[in-house]
Image (spheres, helix red, strand yellow):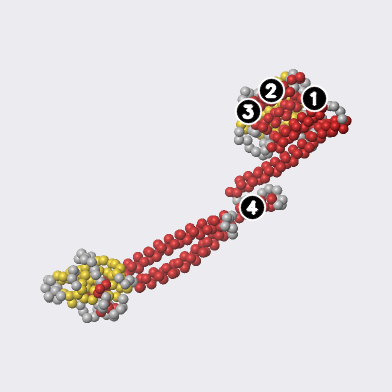
Amino acid sequence: MRTKSLSFRLLIAEGLVLAAFFTLVAFILEQGFLESAEQALKDRLQVQIYALLSAAKLNDTGDLTMPAVLPEPRFENPGSGLYGFIQQAKQNMVWRSQSAIGLEELINPQALIAGTSKFETIKHNRYALHSSVILKSNSGIAREYIFTVTEDAGFVSSQVAHLQETLRLWLLIIGLVLVFIQFSLLRWSLKPLRSIVNDLDAIEHGKKILLDGHYASELEGLAGNLNAFITHERAHLDRYRNTLADLAHSLKTPLAILRGCVESLSDDKEIVHEQISRMNQIVEYQLQRAAAKADHVAIKTVDVSVVINKVKASLSKVYIDKNINFELHIPEQCLIYYEEGDMYEIVGNLLDNACKWCKNSIKVSIELNARKSRRDFSLLLQIEDDGPGIPVGKFNDILKRGIRADENIHGHGIGVTVVFELIQLVGGKLEGGKSQTLNGMRWSIYLP
């Protein structure tokens, strides 16, 4: 597993979380068990205190007496681990069990209030319970004594150690099992991502065209965006290829004319300059088309009315000799979401063709919120002229790449193909037909 993979990072992160969790659980359980064991030991020592209290007596002179044999035999065996002491309050030790010989220096109970007790850990890893009581003799003499019972902590330590060993072993086993389960779940959960990666690799090697697998619902949007990106790139590449083909085809005629002029050694300098200028315009135009983006969504608005007016003003100067009458039925402002450069391409090409083939009249109109073929469009732009129009049955031909209408058919040229492609890229619709008012060509552009 690669260290940069999501599976590795998630597994390491969850492993660290599990380790921290189990460490905390082990600590809490061990502390809880230790407190429980100490409480059980304290209760047992309290029972021994009660046993010593029941055996202790005060004689008539007020001296403490203890029986030779105690109920608990461990008090009689040296080194048994259970030790008893009795000390008169604020005075010396007055009694100790046989098992506590040599251990009196370990017992130094602090002053206690009569009737209270104290549980603590003392030297040499022992627990001690001190209890302060007041004893009275039959003659009425009262004395305050501190009863102390101690026991080695070995029993508690052994229980805690056994718990630690068992607990840590099982927590380790459970942790490993959980890590394995988590690894399996990660592999299963990330399988859709690996499927997309494999499909992308297949697309890269030409085995697939698009991401066509069945992916998780959370990844469907990603797959759709990737497919749109792949389609966009392929369309962009096709545009470059087609533009280069158009460029090469467009240069054939000017080159042939130049070649004829050179071969004939004529002085037709004006023709040569004209064709060179034509070639330069063609190159600039086709490169501009190659730079246009395919399958994009416009995020800026363009004022269609401004574009129409600017193109109309420019063409009026170009075709000043025809004295064209422009009839504009457009609003003062018409904003839509569209690329400004593409809008200039569409309006410029269609108006240029209309100016080229009209007699003297051109009509431009805009209709908002148009409906066509059960679809709602935000804009309908119509450009009409009074020229000869396109012959019947030739409309579809001029939209096909490689068929140059301006070379074989009276009417419109390669610009129509450019317009058709730009409108198709945004899901629009281009229609051509006969103008009902001017009896020439009518172009209808529906934009979403």
Amino acid on which disc 4 is placed: Val
Amino acid on which disc 1 is placed: Pro
Q: Quadrant of the C terminus?
A: top right
The reply to whether discs 2 and 4 touch (Cβ–Cβ < 8 Å) is no
User: Residue 175 location, x and y as percent?
Assistant: 49, 63
**Is residue 201 shown left or right of residue 135?**
right
Task: Tell me which label, 1 or 4, sits earlier in the chain.
Answer: 4
Which mark's residue is nearer the viewer, 1 or 4?
4
Task: Tell me which label, 3 or 4, sits earlier in the chain.
Answer: 4
Please report the residue visible at 18 percent of the width from the left and 68 percent of the height from the top.
Answer: 90
The reply to whether discs 1 and 2 touch (Cβ–Cβ < 8 Å) is no
Task: Tell me which label, 3 or 2, sits earlier in the chain.
Answer: 3
Residue 407 falls in which quadrant of the image? Answer: top right
Amino acid on which disc 3 is placed: Asp
Q: Quadrant of the N terminus?
A: bottom right
- On residue 303, the disc is 3
The residue where tag 2 is placed is 313
Please report the residue visible at 69 percent of the width from the left and 37 percent of the height from the top.
Answer: 291
The residue where tag 4 is placed is 197
Amino acid on which disc 2 is placed: Ala
Helix, strand or loop at mark 3: strand
How far apart in space, not on screen, are marks 2 and 4 (Cα)?
54 Å
Helix, strand or loop at mark 1: loop
**Is residue 332 shown left or right of residue 68?**
right
Please report the residue visible at 79 percent of the width from the left and 34 percent of the height from the top.
Answer: 250
The reply to whether discs 1 and 4 touch (Cβ–Cβ < 8 Å) is no
Which mark's residue is nearer the viewer, 3 or 1?
3
Above or below residue 128? Residue 261 is above
The residue where tag 1 is placed is 388
